Amino acid sequence: MVHGGSVVLVPITSDGQIVLIRNHRWQVGCTVLELAAGTLEPHETPAECAARELAEETGYTAGHLIPLTPIFALPGLTTEIMYPFIAQALTPVGQSLELDEDITVVTYSPDAVR
């Protein structure tokens, strides 16, 4: 499958909590705990996509988006490259979900995430 790329975010609050989302995924028939992520739009940079997806899905903007090394999502199945980012200096702005999205924001300590 040819894919245009995506981003995945690890948002960290000022008190060190990791922001995750509970996202209902019809594909697997349940709600899953996951990192905020999304697909790059045409002519969008990974950093622009990361900022957009962070605000849409978690309701935060980031003062700092720190890029990590890009990774292949599923080599052998797709050409998708995922661009991971650490998001820090978060400011709440409220979610902006798509009509078909059912996402709840939760925070966990790094130990709980591990």
Image (cartoon, rainbow, N blue to C red):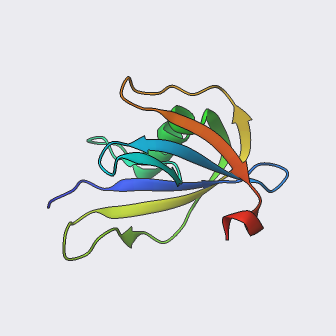
- Number of numbered discs present? 0
Q: Which quadrant, please, contains the C terminus? A: bottom right
Describe residue 82's horizontal placement relative to residue 94 as left or right.
Answer: left
Q: Quadrant of residue 6?
A: bottom left
Describe residue 75's horizontal placement relative to residue 12 as left or right.
Answer: left
Q: Which quadrant, please, contains the N terminus? A: bottom left
Instruction: Give the answer, above or below, for where 49 lies relative to 81.
Output: above
Q: Quadrant of residue 109?
A: bottom right
Q: Position of residue 42 (x, y in %)?
A: 26, 41
Describe residue 57's horizontal placement relative to residue 107 as left or right.
Answer: left
Q: Residue furthest left?
A: 1
Describe residue 98's horizontal placement relative to residue 20 as left or right.
Answer: left
Viewer-side residue, 76 vs 64: 76
Q: Going 41% across and 32% down the picture, which residue do you hit?
A: 101
Q: Residue furthest bottom?
A: 76
Instruction: Give the answer, above or below, for where 81 lies relative to 50.
Output: below
Q: Residue furthest right?
A: 15
Instruction: Give the answer, above or below, for where 86 lies relative to 71.
Output: above
Q: Quadrant of residue 55?
A: top right
Viewer-side residue, 8 vs 32: 32
Viewer-side residue, 14 vs 42: 14
Q: Going 36% across and 28% down the picture, which residue do you hit?
A: 100
Q: Position of residue 11 (x, y in %)?
A: 65, 51
Q: Position of residue 78 (x, y in %)?
A: 20, 66
